[in-house]
Image (cartoon, helix red, strand yellow):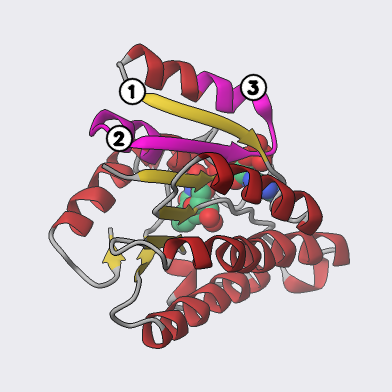
Amino acid sequence: MNTILITGAGTGLGKELALAYAKKGNTIILTGRKLLPLKEVQLLIEEMGGHAEVYTIDITNISELEHSVHKILKHHNVNFLINNAGIGSFGPFTELSLEEIETMINTNVKGTIYMTKIVLPHLLKHRNGKVFNIISTAGQKGKVNESVYVASKFAIRGFTESLQKELEGKLNIKAVYMGGMDTPFWEKSDHIKDKSRLRSPKEIAEKIIKEDENGTDDIFV
Ligand SMILES: NC(=O)c1ccc[n+]([C@@H]2O[C@H](COP(=O)([O-])OP(=O)(O)OC[C@H]3O[C@@H](n4cnc5c(N)ncnc54)[C@H](OP(=O)(O)O)[C@@H]3O)[C@@H](O)[C@H]2O)c1
């Protein structure tokens, strides 16, 4: 069984991956900025007889990230990291604020890279160390009104592909690509008019786990 550290585990895809992996008997380390949603996911996992721990971490705060992750690694033998936390600001590039751009890059790019940097030495001690980087179809092609979000996801695609080559045979690292999901991700934007037409994060989480079990390199769902 694995001990899986998931970022952004209180809502959306992170929550559904946490529930699905816990159901299979894995221990889940739930992380995110807000305590309450994480506690709710922990309770759901405990109610089905599983085990989860909660740590609040803002992945854009390097010192907090380093401190909290070292604490986690001291107490839990994490062998699987899922970099899932991400945010999006959408609209014409000329209308994005510098703050929106900075927050997207700090969260999606730097947050993912710093988290990986801190956890990696620990993962490399395991024979079965594993990383999923949750990307998006936004990491595959450019899109209108998504310029900086797409740029952030292309960055993580490049990061993932490079680590796959650099750590071949030492670490199982997969990029995970999916289209739109009906999650709180879209709450602060009208970029998607009718999000109820999107697939549920539960369906996507189950497909990701199945694809992974089928042994594919990267995961496309
Ligand atoms: N929804 C879609 O259509 C879609 C499609 C393709 C890919 N994706 C990707 O899927 C991933 C999950 O998104 P989702 O759709 O499930 O949206 P979501 O429900 O909004 O989940 C994102 C999670 O990230 C956490 N988060 C945000 N900023 C953070 C920070 N600075 N530090 C730590 N945690 C942070 C949030 O929790 P807190 O606010 O508590 O921190 C939240 O739980 C993202 O990487 C997204 O880019 C989404």
Q: Amino acid at mark 3?
A: Leu
Left or right: 114 as drawn, with respect to 171: right
Q: Residues within 10 Å of mark 3 (few under 14, many from 20)?
A: few
Q: CA distance from mark 3 to mark 2?
A: 20 Å
**Is 149 in the magenta?**
no
Circle 1 — which element? Answer: loop
Question: Which residue is pictured at 53% across the width and 77% down the height?
Answer: 154
Q: Residues within 10 Å of mark 2 (few under 14, many from 20)?
A: some
Q: Position of residue 146 (x, y in %)?
A: 61, 67
Name the residue tied to disc 2.
20
Q: Nearer the viewer, mark 1 or mark 3?
A: 1
Name the residue tied to disc 3.
36
Left or right: 174 as drawn, with respect to 33: left
From the viewer's perspective, is residue 93 above or below residue 36?
Answer: below
Question: Which residue is pictured at 39% across the width and 16% down the height?
Answer: 46
Q: Quadrant of the N terminus?
A: top left
What is the magenta range?
Answer: 17-40
Q: Residue furthest top?
A: 47
Q: Which mark is residue 50?
A: 1
Question: Which residue is pictured at 38% across the width and 43% down the height?
Answer: 3
In the foreground, 147 or 170:
170
Residue 206 lies in what quarter of the image? top left
From the viewer's perspective, is residue 20 above or below residue 199?
Answer: above
Q: Position of residue 52 (x, y in %)?
A: 45, 28
